[in-house]
Image (tube, grey):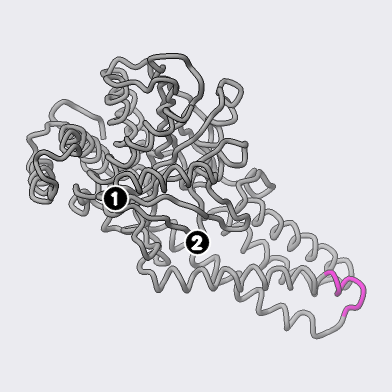
Amino acid sequence: MRLTASSLDLRSEQFNLLIAKWSSTVTMPTNSPETIYTSRIQTWLKHIHALAKDIGPRGPTTDGERQGHIYCQQTLDRLGHHSQWERFRAARSIFTPHLIASLAMLAAFVIYPLAGRTSALVAALIAALSLASELLELSFISNPIRWMVPKGESQNVFAVQEPSGEHKQDLILIGHVDSKRTPLIFKSTGWLSAYQTFTTVAFAAFAVMVALYTLGIFTQWSWILPVSAVSALCAVLLAALCIQADLTPFTDGANDNATAVGLVLTLAEHLQAEPLAHTRVWLVNTGCEDVQHYGAINFLDWHLNEFKNPHALVFEMLGCSGPGWLVKEGIIIPFKATLKLVELAEKTNAAHPELDGYPVSISGGNTEMADALRRGIPTLTLFGMTRENIAPYWHQVGDTVDKIDPAALERNYAFTWHFLRALDEAA
């Protein structure tokens, strides 16, 4: 969809409903310092509406994602920032590498008995290469399967806000533009839990297959093939789940992650009016987060040498709950948020108890915090999970603008602004 003046008309019925919803949820007294964010919340809602409603689904490398970045670029330029557009090639699907790996495991199962020790050697090599590629893919590291998957063009859009005084440090604010597919495995917390259990079993079974076929090179024991059928069955199930996932539609991506992009754009306007004293701020809208963070990885690698005493703050799903700060995440490799930033979040929360913030954690997933931490950048993710560590509408069809809770936006915005000011004062 192309953006036009009419498509961004703030008088639209749904936008007015969002504003009315925000107005009805304000509980702070009129003399509260937090009411100074009223116009900021309206601006944030405008951006969420434009991205999730006017543009809609923004799958990795799709035209929808590109239109989302065009909106970011137009907004930054309109505010007077000098926006920059950087292109890169990225995978089109997060599920294709796992589909290829599972099919390779099935091929190993078929090949193993065909020609004695020779086919056992070939099968063992195929299984080992597939398992290693899977582990590397889940660790955001290039691998043979990644080289094979179809690619498309994506982009990052960013701008830089200079400090008002002496430049002592850099802060990278990150929000990803792309939205997700809606596979069966994300239908409910029960489905997700079952999937996480299954994948753990499947990877263990794949490792057993590698060990068995390696053993078969030397022994040719007859029981190896039927035992490895368990691994082959896991490969069939994994392939079926990947195919089903890639046939599902993309979400509108209101909470995940138009809220993050909208926050970056809203802060771009706020920081222009009130720049931090000693912190240069990079306002980054990344692409292709869903397909293993290609956008964040490319941005950080391309600009790492330009940063001065850098810190990073990643935004995720801030429209329904929070404020929460992510202390731990990970799939294969666990990542912990930088302790001094966690302590700063705790201090911010203690200074503003009315915002009711709390720590959260995730397992079986990563935010773009992992990419910054791997490059030695102190990082924290502000993540709008519930206190029970549930991410609202994650990869679900229901991730639409009507689910946004403006009261959550208000809390998250106030927390973020207080955090930015505290980080700047500590420079």
Comparing labels 2 and 1, the label whose residue is closer to the camera: 1
Q: Name the residue under label 2.
A: 242
Q: Name the residue under label 1.
A: 353
Query: Considering the numbered disc 2 on the image, is that residue within a helix, a strand or a loop?
Result: helix
* Residue 234 lies in the magenta-colored region: no
Image: magenta residue range: 214-220
- Who's the residue at 49% across and 37% down the image? 152
As drawn, the residue found furthest toward the front would be 351
C-alpha distance separating marks 2 and 1: 44 Å
Q: In which quarter of the image is residue 53?
A: top left
Residue 27 is situated, as x and y percent measured from the top left of the image, at: 12, 50
Residue 82 is situated, as x and y percent measured from the top left of the image, at: 37, 15
| First along the sequence among labels 2 and 1 | 2
What residue type is disc 2 on?
Answer: Cys
- Who's the residue at 26% across and 46% down the image? 411
What residue type is disc 1 on?
Answer: Pro
- Who's the residue at 42% across and 55% down the image? 359
Which of 232/210 is in front?
210
Mark 1 nearby-residue class (10 Å; few <14, some 14–19, many ≥20) = few
* Residue 215 lies in the magenta-colored region: yes
Query: Considering the numbered disc 1 on the image, is that residue within a helix, a strand or a loop?
Result: helix
Question: In which quadrant of the rendered image does the N terminus lie?
Answer: top left
Residue 47 is situated, as x and y percent measured from the top left of the image, at: 24, 35
